[in-house]
Image (spheres, coloured by chain):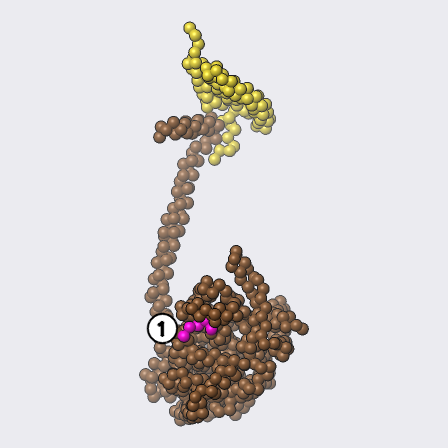
Amino acid sequence: MDILTNLLSLLFLPLGTSILIIALGKHRKKYAPIVAFMSAIGALSLSYILLRNLPESVHYSWEWLAFGDSKFYIGILLDNIGATMLAMVSIVALCIVTFSIGYMSDDAAKGRFFAGVAFFMFSMTGIILADNLIMIFLFWELVGFSSYLLIGHYFQKEEAKSASQKAFIVNRIGDFGFLIGIILTYWQFGTTNIELLSIQSGIDPSLMSTFIGFLLICGFIGKSAQFPLHVWLPDAMAGPTPVSALIHAATMVAAGIYLLIRIDFILTSQVLLFIAYSGTFVALFAGFCAFAQDDIKRILAYSTLSQLGYMAAIFGMGYSGIALFHLITHAFFKALLFLGAGAVIHACHHEQSIFKMGGLFKKMPITSITFIIGTLALCGVYGFSGFYSKDSILIAANDYNGTLFYFLVFGAFMTAGYMGRLIWIVFFGKANSEAASSAHEVSAVMTVPLILLSGFAIFVGLNAYWPFGLGASIVSDLDHLHHLSGYKEIHKWVLILGSAAWIVGLGVSLIFYGKGSSEDRLQLKFPKVFAFLQGRLWVDELYQYYVNHIQKPVAEFLSFVDEVILRGIIVRGGAGLVGVLGVGFRLLQVGKINNYVLWFFVGLLLFWLYGIDLF
Amino acid sequence: MTIGINEFIIVSSLLFLIGFLGVILRRNTIIIFMSIELMLNAVNLALVAFSRYNNTMDGSIFVFFIMTVAAAEVAVGLAIIVMIYRQRQTILVNELNQLKG
């Protein structure tokens, strides 16, 4: 199989799967899981064959549309960064689809679910393979659409319905800026092809514009849920848990970071500076918010936000390779954590509040151990995958800016704190509800993906051992770090601080919250602090106020203009005038030929009078 | 007394007026048709008179064309009237008012 066939079949296999599942009709419920599973296996095998045969990078391009001299192309570009993403997405997707077979086993709308997941995989592969910004934008929107579809899976619930709309609308705001950015890029550079852009911005750096850069990163801010468009991600947890794992933790939200890595050469230093600071802010802000949540999935959602903040911060500092590194390690351990949370929720009969769980370690040992492995990886415990990427981030941050470095270390402490809170309350102590006390280990179809992913969560940090030369940009960035002056001292210092952060975080949360508590002690002891954290800086309330008090009057005014002036006066008025004229002229149509002749002569007379300049 | 251009114009105008009044006042299609012919011939008379007055042949040539066209028109028009009579058993225009708006 040549590379092009391989690429195209990899891209269209999930789309075909999605169509096939829909075409199954009433057999959907029975066959959808197995079809989706086979497709995920097929996608993984295709990726494997592809990556084994892949030269340095491949690029294909076809003309798509031509408007006069403006030509638009579609094409496939698979370089080392894309290949790394592709490998991660294929593996994570297979684990999550397998897990879904168990998790969704008693769901009535399995067909819709698996078709949606397959469609998402198609869109995501499209983003990874796209060679120009317009094509990225197309698949970007498709990803947003499938996210909308899957968040709203339980559309009978008001919460899920509004969450899916919120996600869609908030993403639209970011994408609007992104679209304008793409148009301006085309205007400025005459192309949106990523390779050409990189060549042109290299030849003539004066073409780069901060304004366009800020517009382009709007797409990233929306999709990767960065401040101030982060509001949709926690609400998106209303979707099924495997969806949260696949889309809202491992792949789609990481697509924003992937976009940044793809276009980093046209972002000016001001844009990078903004990304670095806003990323650090999100890393801390989301960490604080996580303390005031009691829904296990929402805690993980804020954790995802925080880790995306880390990726953005390190990207802004100029290390796109390390951002990719953290993206990959995070994808594995966060998918693991979400699936673990899914297993817990499944075992506790869809109970999601951590204060109604407790003591699950003895009842669900495999889930608990894998979840704890995920947590340790997330906290950056030495030897786990998260350690390698977070360590590199902190070293780079130390080199970049002392303040950001301490903020990020504090963020790591917060991570350990809220994850410790979750672990101690959910898995240790005693059961706090009927559902939790009757919980038992989930079936093998769900534990096997957990075990697989926990293997990745431990070992994926060893990027030197990645096959097929994946992650070349990571290696070069790490090399750059290793040759910093005083690297040894910095490394030691970061190691001490980083380890202190997770040890203190986990320890303090154990002492403060205790094992298996049934109440939030922070809320009891410091209600004001808790209320502040629960307010999440009142961004949602601010948007609510904006919509109710600013957007609504404007909309009402426009509605008035539309209803009264446009529709009432211009459209209805125009029709009325013509109608009245019609009534008048109809009086002339008396049905007597003699009268018509008379009018004919009157008309002739008028023309004649006009002709002799009488009037 | 010599007959000048003025007398011709007066006769021609009278003929035209009679034809016009016939068209707008009469109800019988045949009569209306004849009135139209009368108007055409009034115009013909005026054209011949002007042709003579100006010493050119233009108006006379025009008259030949008008007569030819009028002959053709009579053939078509009478055929239409016969068809209308066969269909409706009437040729009174006040009863032929199906196209009234």
Is A109 rendered above or below residue A448? above
Q: Is residue A8 visible?
A: yes
> Is residue A427 rendered magenta in the image?
no
Q: Across the whole image, how many numbered discs are drawn on residues?
A: 1
Q: Which residue is mark 1?
A: A541
Which x, y percent locates residue A184?
A: 44, 64
Q: Kindly identify the residue that appears in the image at 33 percent across and 84 percent down.
A: A529
Asked which secondary structure carries label 1, the reply is: helix
Magenta range: A265-269
Q: What color was chain B assigned in the picture?
A: yellow
Magenta part, dominant SS: helix
Rendering colour (chain A):
brown
Give the letter of the chain under mark 1: A
Quarter holding residue A583:
top left
Q: Nearer the viewer, residue A501 or A560?
A: A501
Percent from the top left, x then y, of residue A66?
Answer: 54, 58
